[in-house]
């Protein structure tokens, strides 16, 4: 149990290194929570600070999903011993979930972070790289049709457990459960996006989308 708790805690701390806030601090004290949508994530970073800033934000946010999942589960830490209360598979999932949670509620930045998409991508790429393709196809498809980044992210997250259920079934039951929990969390962190869509507020994030073009006619 000590191993599980300590590694999950380290994963949470790593996830709390919010890319947008860290790069903003290194760039002279920029706090993007005071700009645009107020969200400390990659999309708001791109809208308010430009492509280069957003690129480094994505590198940090994806990387902190990759590293805890890759390094911590098999790591032998002398003072906590070995033999977790859960299997190695679930220890990996727990570290990934903690990193995602840390991104959204970072202890270093007043528990006010992003919505978890980039860090989730890093976690899933490390656990099973084959999940990237269906997720990115759904993401770009929804973005092209409707033009909303938040909606595309939600649908891509929901598509992952559905894809696993259709292709692997019971053979990947634990991963289906994990990705389903993550998808529900992504829906929760994007609840403000859903409220705006339901209320008919705002406009598509990209103009080349099918909905965006019809919206401007």
Image (tube, rainbow, N blue to C red):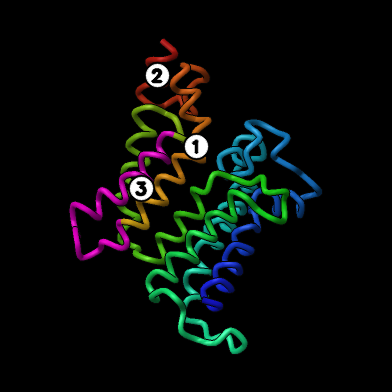
Above or below residue 86? Residue 145 is above
Dot 3 lies on which element? helix
Q: Position of residue 124 (x, y in %)?
A: 40, 59
- Residue that carries the numbered disc 3 in the rendered image: 136
Question: Can you tell which quarter of the image residue 81 is in?
Answer: bottom right
The reply to whether the magenta stretch includes residue 171 is: yes
Residue at position x 44%, y 30% in the image: 148
Dot 1 alpha-carbon crowd within 10 angstroms: few under 14, some 14 to 19, many 20 or more: some
Could you say which is closer to the camera, residue 191 or residue 203?
191
Q: Earlier in the sequence, mark 2 or mark 3?
A: 3
Neighbour tally class for label 2: few under 14, some 14-19, many 20 plus, Cα within 10 Å? some
Q: Nearer the viewer, residue 4 or 89?
A: 4
Gap between marks 2 and 3 measured at Cα? 22 Å
Direction from residue 183 to residue 43 in the image, left or right: right
Which residue lies most toward the bottom here? Answer: 78
Q: Which mark is first along the chain, 1 or 2?
A: 1
Residue 200: percent from left, percent from top: 46, 16
Residue shown at 50%/51% (left/top)?
A: 118
How far, Cα to Cα, is label 2 from label 1?
Answer: 24 Å
Label 1, on which residue? 190
Write the start and end of the magenta stretch as one range: 151-176
The quarter of the image holding the C terminus is top left
Tally of numbered discs: 3
Among all residues in the image, which is located at the extreme top? 217
Picture coordinates of residue 147, whole percent (x, y): 42, 29
What secondary structure is the magenta-colored segment mainly? helix
Query: Mark 1–mark 3 contact, CB under 8 Å?
Result: no
Question: Residue 68, labelled with which disc?
Answer: none
The residue mark sitting in front, 1 or 3, is: 1
What number is the disc on residue 213? 2
Q: Mark 1 to mark 3: distance in Å?
A: 18 Å
């Amino acid at each position: 149990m000590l191993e599980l708790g300590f590694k999950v805690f380290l994963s949470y701390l790593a996830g709390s290194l919010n890319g947008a806030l860290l790069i903003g601090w290194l760039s002279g004290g920029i706090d993007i929570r005071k700009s645009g949508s107020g969200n400390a994530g990659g999309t708001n970073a791109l809208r308010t600070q430009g492509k280069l800033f957003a690129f480094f934000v994505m590198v940090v946010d994806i990387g902190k999903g990759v590293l805890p999942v890759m390094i911590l589960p098999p790591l032998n830490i002398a003072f906590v011993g070995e033999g977790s209360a859960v299997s190695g598979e679930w220890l990996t999932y727990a570290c990934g979930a903690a990193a995602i949670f840390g991104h959204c509620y970072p202890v270093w930045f007043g528990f006010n972070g992003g919505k978890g998409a980039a860090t989730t991508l890093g976690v899933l790429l490390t656990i099973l790289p084959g999940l990237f393709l269906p997720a990115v196809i759904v993401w770009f498809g929804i973005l092209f049709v409707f033009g909303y980044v938040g909606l595309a992210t939600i649908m891509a997250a929901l598509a992952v457990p559905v894809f696993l259920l259709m292709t692997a079934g019971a053979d990947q039951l634990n991963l289906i459960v994990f990705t389903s929990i993550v998808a529900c969390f992504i829906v929760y962190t994007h609840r403000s996006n859903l409220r705006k869509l339901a209320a008919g507020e705002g406009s598509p994030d990209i103009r080349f989308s099918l909905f965006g073009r019809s919206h401007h006619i």
